[in-house]
């Protein structure tokens, strides 16, 4: 899917407060008219909620093996969607996989697109000169890299070293369970993903900052004693907010897809925490599909639905913004 | 419609037509395609074999891509499988796993067991027809041990020969222990009498290579001139390897004239069913079908044991595995029998000891600690660890992809249920895995070991002797070490076996390892093959396979 | 414009330098090394240490890197650890050929069909056909590659036995009619990977074509041309077509990038001997030379694609200033 940020118009018309307020409202209104977009938003939100409520909603423990009920088909007694090779309930594992995807996508979006990116963009735009050059060049390098390749490489090579460091940290600080709960493996995955996803929002914010800071009325406001915080909140933020949302929504499918591939390859979320990558891995292979199709089709359908809705959502927001 | 749309539509239609025609042709011709290629290949192939026997007997099998075809560098079984067909040495293993002379016609051992004299056969020839001389043998062994070659394994298999260590480290410029007495006799001296020395010589480190070819051609390994029953006819990287019987080999022409290994291609079983392969290995997904008398696969199915052991190893210097009771408790808490039946569909055999079937000293009696949850808990309570001071435990394993091994996941559950232990699984890729074990940072791990030769020394001594460099458990027990050392030089076969069996029992009781499974091979073999030989370990096998006329 | 182009091109070597140096350090910092992998389970630490020394793996990183850089700039990517006896280039180049051919073939399929679909969509805008086309193509693009390959394998290879389940047999097979006439037909191994690669690419081309056609048809000069009495055909050919095609250059770059990333998974699943499947083998065996070479290949391709796309994009839309914004 397209991750390109230059697809999103960065040569913006300059907005003064009032217009930008109604811009957001106008876009939202247009969005609500798109049935497909609204539908996909509803589905995405529902899936997110399911994911968060996973422990409550799942009939079984996702780790619980029951060798006597292995490889049951969907509709078997007690297992709505069947079981896998170790007798673990597939419905439970699917729900937890949704949760994994939800968490990772959300955190990546938050850290990369909504935190790291805008902050760096602000710094680059505000302080200019060397900060700008440095940040922009790094961004250029990162966006020129084949992301998947680098993510695989990074995860494969750094995993062990970082794990050692975290263990030392655990010993030193007395905080326990960082690794055993699986939090660490999440950290590594969304860390790497964020690394490649901050560039887009950085560029958006930077462009906006650059175009605004020279305006007369800003200079006037500063002369009148407006603090940088005020300038930020009233001038910069409203204009970039929607753009960032735009950029992020286009990237959602890419982020979820990358996590899927990383886990499938083995460098993403570690077992026993289920993820669509691991469920698909266990279910793929022509002969497995022939013998036990539900192992592939159950997670496959759900993850396709999720990805499709991400795509439609991003599309609808994009269309709404452009007034198509 | 505008002309633009028309041209767009036309372009699209043309594209679709191309695909459709191609697709239809493929469908119609796919069945016939294979015969076309095979016939074409045979017709083009003007080798002397066809002159003798125009039938062109071919065997098509799946194969892995070898890391190297240089016998002195090989360390993995995939490369080894090709190497033992292309190259050969003084001795080899026959189908019954006995050490028999190969290029050597006769072997004399001195009474003190230190000096071996090999006489070469008259008809020992290279693929190009040149006769093998004692000089070739001496040079080959020297090359294997040469510092320039940088082989990682030569020392392991040839270190018993006097002077090899010094030569390898560049301390001496001559290999004292290997001498050519005349053009057909070689004398090898070893450092102490070892009954397993000849077994070690069957490993490719002692295979013969052609000096003039190696010294003149940098890329010699792509079409090596060697002494094995087959020569390397083609090596298409990533696609296929073709071996052809060497007409100069002293065994004469085998039943299989050509072996075609396809290296890529996805599921072997599907290709077997589409008649692209003559043999395929069965995975757990299809084992039910293969064993079902009413299925089409049943009549082709064969199962044999392989000489390998999968086990869990403990680092006995790391808590909590410094306490033997913990290790024993964990061994008794897992139900390997049920897991083998249910999770693996009966495809693996629960191990009955450390020595796999076929190794001297193997018995069918189950010597392992039995599955007994009560006893496991009782054993655990004897340890100095309780649930409050139990340190975190990490189980390390290697895997490809997203899932931990199925048996691992089952074990983890059982350790949780029976002993209340929460064990974390850490998957590392092969290279990291080796690193972790080497640096002694792993607490417990799962791994396998395949025998190189059917002598218990190859597993009990190498892996579990207290001072062995390959002993990663760091376990050392003086009585066991003594038994192993004494067995090294004991030429009485029955006494050796007893010593190894005693060592095995002691090791099982002390549990630095939990033996899990003995390996087995499950194959389907097509009707083109009259007799299929599935070797339990790496040894030349193409010569034992008989094709149907 | 020219200045910008020159600046971007001149940055290329620096970019490659940074990227290759990072991968160099990354792989060596991580656990395991090629000697250890080669040794397998039979490992004498003394022996391994000796070999590492001889191979130069104990030298400081910058020394090793400069050595590699010097060799690489002369085209020497070193000896392969994963296929001993061959150089890295000899191992990679046939694979590069396979992946490259598949990628180009996929592009050649995506474009005609995508253009066709986009043109249809523009023509029938407002009817049910337009959104259906867009939605189906979007769906095809959203499908995870893993799923697509698994289902295709199952359907065509296992169930219907029409296609081989994986592997590679070249592009063309020769079929002899009655032993006299030779007919080249496509090798059946290419179908599943081509389907897997192209599914995701249609939507990008189709939407761009559709949007451009619609937009250009509305512009003043096209209306003027019509008003002048030029025939519809001339209008289409001279104005609409020409302007619709240039933006496609940008999509080429994205599509190729997507195909390359998708090839990593598809080749592994299908057992196709390309550089995608080789990537995992190289990483798994810690074949430093192979990993470096692959990084150079992938990065150079990506960077060039990016550059081409950017330049084409700016040519297309003069409102977009190329430069620091």
Image (cartoon, rainbow, N blue to C red):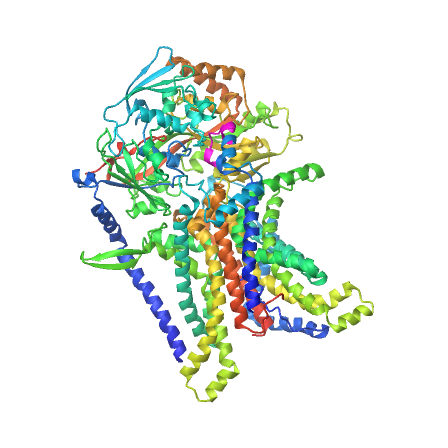
Tell me if residue B472 comes above or below residue C164 in the rendering. Answer: above
The answer to whether residue B298 is above or below residue B469 is below
Image coordinates for residue B252, horizontal then vertical, percent = 21, 31
- Res B221 quadrant in image: top left
Name, please, the residue furthest toward the right.
Answer: A224
Name the side, left or right, on which A284 lies relative to A29. left
Q: Nearer the viewer, residue C55 or A76?
A: C55
A255 displayed left or right of A237? left
* Residue at the far bottom in the pictured view: C228
Question: Which image quadrant: the N terminus of chain C?
Answer: bottom right
What quarter of the picture does the C terminus of chain C occupy?
bottom right
Q: Is residue A78 visible?
A: no
Tell which of A51 and C140 is nearer to you. Answer: C140
> Relative to the observer, which residue lies in front, B169 or C310?
B169
A301 relative to A37, above or below: above
Instruction: Residue A179: tell me if it is visible.
Output: yes
Give the vertical position of A81 relative to C50 (above or below): below
Q: How many numbered marks have been drawn onto this rendered protein structure?
A: 0
- The magenta segment is C37-48
- Residue C68 position, x and y percent, is 51, 45
Q: Is residue B178 a member of the stretch shown in magenta?
A: no
Choose top left, top right, bottom left or bottom right for residue C173: bottom left
Task: Tell me what residue is drawn at x 50 percent, y 66 percent.
Answer: C250
Which residue is farthest top? B111
Q: Position of residue A279 (x, y in %)?
A: 50, 48
Q: Is residue C44 magenta?
A: yes
Q: Position of residue C249 (x, y in %)?
A: 47, 67
Comparing B489 with A85, the one in front is B489
Q: Is residue B321 left or right of residue B296?
A: right
């Amino acid at each position: 899917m397209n991750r390109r940020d230059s697809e999103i118009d960065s040569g913006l018309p300059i907005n003064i407060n009032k217009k930008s307020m109604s811009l957001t409202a106008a876009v939202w209104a247009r969005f609500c008219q798109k049935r497909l977009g609204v539908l996909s938003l509803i589905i995405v939100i529902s899936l997110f909620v399911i994911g968060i409520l996973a422990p409550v909603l799942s009939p079984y423990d996702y780790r619980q093996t029951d060798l006597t009920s292995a490889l049951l088909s969907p509709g078997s007694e007690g297992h709505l969607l069947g079981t896998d090779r170790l007798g673990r309930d597939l419905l439970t594992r699917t729900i937890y996989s949704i949760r994994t995807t939800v968490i990772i996508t959300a955190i990546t979006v938050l850290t990369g697109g909504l935190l790291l990116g805008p902050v760096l963009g602000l710094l680059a735009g505000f302080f200019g000169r060397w900060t700008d050059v440095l940040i922009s060049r790094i961004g250029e390098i990162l966006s020129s890299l084949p992301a998947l390749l680098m993510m695989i490489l990074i995860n494969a090579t750094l995993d062990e070293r970082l794990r050692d460091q975290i263990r030392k940290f655990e010993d030193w600080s007395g905080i326990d369970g960082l690794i055993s709960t699986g939090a660490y493996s999440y950290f590594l995955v969304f860390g790497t993903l964020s690394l490649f996803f901050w560039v887009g929002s950085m560029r958006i914010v930077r462009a906006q900052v650059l175009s605004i800071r020279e305006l007369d009325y800003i200079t006037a406001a500063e002369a009148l004693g407006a603090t940088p915080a005020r300038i930020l909140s009233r001038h910069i933020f409203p204009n970039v907010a929607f753009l960032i949302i735009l950029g992020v929504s286009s990237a959602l499918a890419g982020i979820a897809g990358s996590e899927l591939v990383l886990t499938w390859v083995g460098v993403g979320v570690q077992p026993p925490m289920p993820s669509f990558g691991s469920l698909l891995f266990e279910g793929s292979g022509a002969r497995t599909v022939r013998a036990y199709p539900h192992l592939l089709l159950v997670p496959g359908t759900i993850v396709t639905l999720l990805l499709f809705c991400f795509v439609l959502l991003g599309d609808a927001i994009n269309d709404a913004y452009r007034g198509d | 419609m505008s002309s633009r749309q028309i041209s767009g539509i036309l372009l699209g239609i043309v594209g679709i037509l191309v695909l459709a025609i191609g697709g239809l042709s493929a469908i119609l011709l796919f069945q016939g395609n294979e015969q076309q290629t095979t016939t074409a290949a045979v017709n083009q192939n003007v080798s002397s074999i066809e002159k003798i026997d125009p039938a062109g007997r071919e065997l098509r099998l799946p194969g892995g891509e070898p890391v190297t075809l240089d016998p002195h560098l090989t360390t993995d079984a995939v490369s080894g499988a090709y190497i033992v067909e292309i190259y050969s040495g003084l001795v080899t293993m026959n189908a019954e796993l006995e050490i028999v002379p190969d290029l050597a016609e006769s072997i004399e051992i001195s009474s003190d067991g230190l000096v071996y004299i090999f006489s070469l056969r008259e008809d020992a020839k290279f693929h190009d027809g040149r006769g093998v001389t004692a000089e070739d043998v001496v040079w080959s062994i020297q090359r294997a041990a040469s510092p320039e070659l940088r082989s990682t394994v030569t020392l392991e298999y040839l270190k018993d020969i006097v002077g090899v260590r010094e030569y390898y480290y560049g301390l001496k410029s001559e290999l004292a222990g290997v001498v050519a007495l005349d053009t057909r006799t070689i004398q090898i001296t070893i450092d102490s009498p070892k009954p397993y020395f000849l077994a070690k010589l069957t490993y490719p480190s002692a295979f013969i290579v052609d000096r003039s070819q190696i010294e003149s051609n940098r890329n010699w390994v792509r079409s090596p001139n060697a002494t094995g029953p087959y020569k390397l006819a083609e090596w298409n990287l990533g696609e296929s390897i073709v071996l052809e019987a060497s007409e100069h080999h002293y065994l004469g022409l085998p039943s299989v004239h050509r072996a075609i290994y396809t290296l890529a291609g996805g599921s072997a079983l599907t290709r077997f069913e589409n008649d692209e392969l003559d043999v395929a290995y069965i995975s757990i997904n299809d084992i039910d079908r293969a064993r079902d008398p009413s299925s089409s696969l049943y009549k082709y199915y064969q199962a044999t044991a392989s000489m390998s052991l999968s086990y869990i190893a403990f680092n006995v210097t790391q808590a909590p595995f410094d306490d033997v009771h913990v290790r024993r408790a964990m061994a008794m808490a897992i139900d390997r029998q049920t897991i083998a039946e249910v999770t693996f569909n009966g495809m693996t055999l629960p191990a009955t000891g450390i020595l796999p079937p076929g190794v001297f000293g193997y018995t069918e009696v189950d010597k392992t600690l039995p599955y007994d949850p009560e006893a496991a808990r009782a054993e655990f309570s004897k340890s100095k660890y309780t649930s409050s001071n139990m340190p975190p435990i990490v189980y390390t394993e290697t895997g490809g992809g997203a899932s931990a091994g199925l048996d691992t996941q089952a074990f983890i559950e059982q350790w949780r249920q029976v002993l209340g232990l929460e064990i974390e699984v850490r998957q590392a890729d092969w290279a990291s895995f080796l690193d972790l074990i080497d640096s002694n940072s792993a607490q417990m791990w799962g791994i396998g070991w395949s025998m190189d030769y059917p002598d218990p020394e190859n597993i009990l001594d190498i892996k579990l002797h207290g001072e062995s460099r390959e002993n990663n458990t760091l376990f050392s027990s003086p009585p066991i070490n003594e038994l192993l050392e004494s067995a090294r030089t004991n030429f009485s076969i029955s006494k050796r076996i007893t010593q190894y069996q005693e060592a095995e029992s002691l090791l099982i009781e002390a549990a630095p390892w939990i033996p899990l499974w003995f390996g087995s091979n499950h194959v389907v073999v097509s009707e083109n093959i009259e007799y299929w030989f599935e070797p339990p370990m790496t040894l030349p096998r193409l010569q034992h396979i008989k094709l149907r006329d | 414009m020219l200045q910008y182009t020159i600046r971007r091109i001149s940055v290329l070597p620096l970019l490659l330098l940074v990227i290759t140096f990072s991968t160099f350090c990354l792989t060596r910092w991580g656990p395991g090394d090629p000697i250890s992998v080669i040794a397998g389970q039979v490992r004498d630490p003394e022996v391994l240490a000796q070999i590492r020394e001889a191979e130069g793996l104990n030298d400081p990183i910058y020394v090793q890197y400069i050595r590699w850089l010097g060799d690489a700039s002369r085209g020497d990517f070193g000896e392969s650890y994963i296929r001993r006896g061959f150089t890295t280039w000899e191992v990679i180049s046939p694979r590069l050929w396979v992946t490259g051919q598949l990628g180009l073939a996929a592009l050649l399929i995506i474009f005609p069909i995508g253009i066709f679909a986009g043109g249809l969509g523009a023509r029938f805008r407002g009817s049910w056909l337009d959104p259906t086309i867009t939605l189906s193509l979007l769906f095809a693009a959203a499908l995870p590659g893993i799923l697509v390959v698994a289902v295709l394998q199952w359907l065509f290879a296992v169930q219907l036995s029409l296609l081989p389940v994986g592997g590679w047999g070249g592009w063309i097979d020769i079929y002899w009619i009655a032993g006299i006439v030779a007919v080249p037909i496509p090798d059946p191994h290419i179908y599943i990977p081509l389907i897997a690669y192209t599914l995701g690419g249609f939507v990008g081309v189709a939407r761009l074509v559709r949007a451009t056609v619609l937009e250009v048809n509305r512009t003043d000069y096209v209306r003027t041309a019509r008003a002048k009495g030029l025939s519809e055909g001339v209008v289409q050919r001279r104005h609409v077509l020409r302007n619709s095609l240039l933006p496609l250059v940008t999509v080429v770059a994205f599509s190729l990038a997507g195909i390359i990333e998708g090839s990593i998974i598809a080749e592994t699943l299908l057992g196709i001997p390309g550089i995608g499947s080789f990537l995992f083998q190289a990483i798994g065996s810690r074949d430093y030379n192979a990993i470096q070479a692959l990084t150079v290949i992938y990065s150079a391709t990506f960077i060039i694609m990016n550059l081409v796309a950017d330049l084409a994009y700016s040519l297309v839309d003069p409102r977009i200033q190329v430069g620091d914004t």
